[in-house]
């Protein structure tokens, strides 16, 4: 029993080695002829229980090969959609149907418009060649696949795009199932090649340029008005208020302010003149007293005796005023009056009669 179990384990190990070798050889698949051997190797690897990571890589390669060789008939545009396209009453309606079938986004703007026109002309070609529903759908999907891979996904050169197109047309113009299905006849395939030559490949650089985003020039508009802009309105506060009568620029609007200012100036001048008159009077009195004192000192032998004699004499009778002192006082009074009379005359002239 133990010997049988060991033999079974040895056989299982050998089977896994063979399955791993077979899967490794099948992983070099590149063309449609390698699809079937790869599929068989994957099935054997699953049966013997190989590592799931090795099987996952093989399944990914198989999916790519099948997608590459899958027929494009009725993949994007169904029979019902073709009937709607034929019944469309305007170009805009037909382009709307094609935009929906091809999965285009209206948010792409100019790029969507270019692709919508591209697919619309392809549809017109199917009508001019009188292709049936399967052939028309295959051709529309073929051109979409060509544009998507050559321009959007891989950014191919024109030579590589031609190889891709020739491979697509060849796979859909010969009957070799499961590798290819003849959707087009030989003369139809030649017409398709000629149409692509004078259409897609003639404007290949234009289609490629539509999806190239190269910032060549950046323009910035700067507005320079002749008149300065009006400043923005700022909020006002009560603390900002001022008395208009205190603003020098508004003094002309308040004549009563000027009149009161003139009256204040006249009063100030009168007060100043009265002060000067009082000052002159005090000076004159002090000058007269000094002169009398000097005369007393000159007539006596000693200062003390002369002073006492003068006081005794003034107590008995008043001493006459000197003519020089009187003239000085009168001159001071005349000077003060000459300063006061003109402002007073001006104020009197303004009084109502």
Image: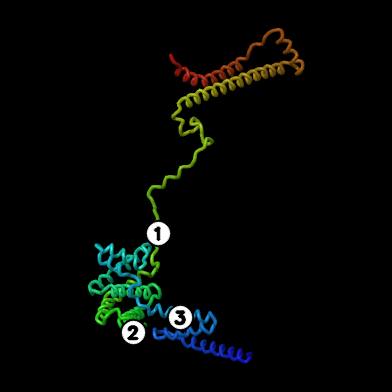
- Judging from the image, what secondary structure is the residue with disc 3 in? helix
Q: Which mark is residue 138?
A: none
Look at mark 2 in the image and give the residue it sits on. Answer: 176
- Judging from the image, what secondary structure is the residue with disc 2 in? loop
Mark closer to the chain start, 2 or 1: 2
- Can you give x and y, in whole percent of width and height, for residue 135 in the image? 28, 75
The CA span between labels 2 and 3 is: 22 Å
The CA span between labels 2 and 1 is: 61 Å
Residue 29 higher or lower than 350, as above or below:
below
- Can you give x and y, in whole percent of width and height, for residue 88 in the image? 26, 64
- Can you give x and y, in whole percent of width and height, for residue 332 in the image? 57, 20
Seen from the viewer's position, the closer of residues 293 and 9 is 9
- Dot in front, 2 or 1: 2
Mark closer to the chain start, 2 or 3: 3
* Residue at x 30% of width, y 78% of height: 183
Tally the numbered discs.
3
Look at mark 1 in the image and give the residue it sits on. Answer: 220
Residue at the front extreme of this rendering: 1
User: Is 160 situated left or right of 331 in this image?
Assistant: left
Seen from the viewer's position, the closer of residues 56 and 345 is 56
User: Is 303 situated left or right of 192 in this image?
Assistant: right
- Judging from the image, what secondary structure is the residue with disc 1 in? loop
Cβ–Cβ below 8 Å for labels 2 and 1? no
The CA span between labels 3 and 1 is: 51 Å
Look at mark 3 in the image and give the residue it sits on. Answer: 61
* Residue at x 51% of width, y 23% of height: 263
Mark closer to the chain start, 3 or 1: 3
């Amino acid at each position: 029993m133990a010997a049988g179990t060991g033999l079974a384990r040895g056989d299982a190990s050998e089977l896994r080695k063979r399955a791993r070798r077979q899967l490794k050889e099948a992983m070099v698949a590149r063309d449609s002829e390698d699809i079937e051997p790869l599929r068989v190797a994957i099935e054997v690897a699953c049966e013997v229980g190989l590592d799931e990571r090795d099987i996952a890589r093989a399944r990914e390669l198989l999916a790519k090969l099948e997608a590459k060789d899958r027929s494009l008939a009725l993949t994007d545009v169904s029979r019902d959609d073709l009937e709607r396209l034929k019944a469309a009453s305007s170009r805009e309606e037909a382009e709307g149907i094609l935009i929906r079938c091809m999965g285009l986004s209206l948010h792409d703007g100019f790029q969507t418009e270019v692709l919508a026109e591209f697919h619309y002309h392809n549809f017109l070609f199917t009508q001019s060649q009188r292709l049936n529903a399967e052939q028309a759908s295959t051709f529309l999907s073929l051109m979409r696949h060509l544009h998507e891979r050559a321009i959007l996904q891989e950014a191919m050169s024109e030579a590589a795009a031609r190889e891709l197109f020739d491979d697509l047309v060849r796979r859909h113009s010969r009957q070799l199932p499961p590798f290819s299905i003849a959707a087009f006849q030989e003369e139809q395939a030649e017409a398709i090649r000629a149409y692509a030559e004078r259409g897609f490949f003639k404007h290949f650089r234009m289609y490629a340029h539509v999806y190239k985003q190269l910032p060549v020039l950046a323009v910035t508009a700067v507005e320079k008005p002749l008149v300065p802009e009006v400043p923005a309105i700022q909020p006002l506060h009560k603390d900002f208020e001022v008395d208009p009568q205190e603003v020098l620029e508004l003094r002309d609007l308040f004549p009563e302010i000027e009149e009161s200012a003139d009256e204040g100036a006249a009063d100030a001048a009168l007060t100043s003149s009265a002060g000067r008159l009082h000052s002159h009077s005090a000076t004159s009195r002090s000058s007269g007293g000094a002169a009398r004192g000097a005369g007393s000192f000159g007539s006596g032998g000693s200062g003390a005796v002369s002073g006492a004699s003068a006081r005794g004499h003034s107590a008995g009778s008043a001493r006459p005023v000197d003519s020089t002192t009187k003239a000085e006082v009168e001159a001071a009074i005349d000077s003060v009056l000459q300063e006061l009379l003109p402002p007073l005359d001006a104020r009197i002239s303004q009084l109502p009669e």
